[in-house]
Image (cartoon, rainbow, N blue to C red):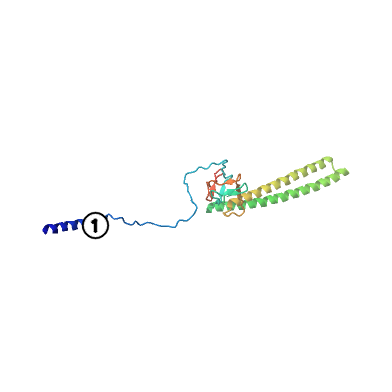
Amino acid sequence: MKRSITWIFRITVAVALIGAIAWALRPRASIVETAQATRSVLEATVTAEGKTRVKDLFVVAAPVDGELERIALKAGDTVSSATVIARIWPVAPRPLDVRSRAEALAAVSAARAAIERARAAEKEAVGALAHAESQLATARTLSSAGAVPPKDFEHAGHEVEIRRQAVEASRAALNATRADLVRAEAAAAVSTDQAGRTATPVHSPTSGRILRVLRESAGPLAAGTPLA
């Protein structure tokens, strides 16, 4: 009787152990993502380094000294031979200190006074010429009548020529003083705006595409500075 119970117990334990092993080894469901299959376009992207070959390369440089206006063009922009790549303004007068300003204003006053003197000298020369021409006319009449020697008529003619040259010299001196006044006023100028100044446009030498802008920001630059 005891042997029967022992065998039953052993068989029960074996069955339970086998069942536990079978339960542990049973296949389990896996979590997957599902989607509905549709017809579409297959896209393939290739990423690699490339090298651009330029047939004709042009470097645009500043033709004059001045103040560069900010360049609005960017790399990749298309240009033609009429496209203005940059504008260069003449350099604005630099600010003057108190002493330099006073000296510049004094030079302006001196130049204006010189113009007045030159005008007075011109008027005096013109008056002297008119008087010499009057004397020449009188000498011509008297010489024709035989009242004065021919030498007096020749002397009057020489005097007219001398006075005419004096008038020309006075007018040249007046023009020189006017030029001095212009220079003095330019030296005393304090305006830094673009009024009265003309910009120099820098055109593209040919039709093409901007590869790189070498000088984008505005500011002073020297002639020959590469721009694009």
Residue neighbourhood size for the residue with mark 1, other residues' Cα within 10 Å, grouped as few (<14), some (14–19), many (≥20): few
Q: How many marks?
A: 1
**Left or right of residue 1, residue 221 in this image:** right
- Tell which of 155 and 77 is nearer to you: 77
**Left or right of residue 175, residue 134 in this image:** right
Percent coordinates x, y for residue 141 in the rendering: 86, 46
Give the amino acid type for the residue marked by disc 1 in the picture. Answer: Gly
Residue in the image at 73% along x and 48% along y: 125
Residue in the image at 66% along x and 47% along y: 176
**Left or right of residue 184, residue 126 in this image:** right
Percent coordinates x, y for residue 56 in the rendering: 58, 41
Specify the farthest residue to the left: 2
- Tell which of 211 and 4 is nearer to you: 4
**Left or right of residue 226, residue 167 in this image:** right
Percent coordinates x, y for residue 179 in the rendering: 65, 48
- Tell which of 202 and 22 is nearer to you: 22
State the image quarter where residue 6 is shown: bottom left
Which element is circle 1 on?
Answer: helix
Specify the farthest residue to the right: 145
- Tell which of 176 and 9 is nearer to you: 9
According to the image, label 1 marks what residue?
Answer: 19
- Quadrant placement of the N terminus: bottom left
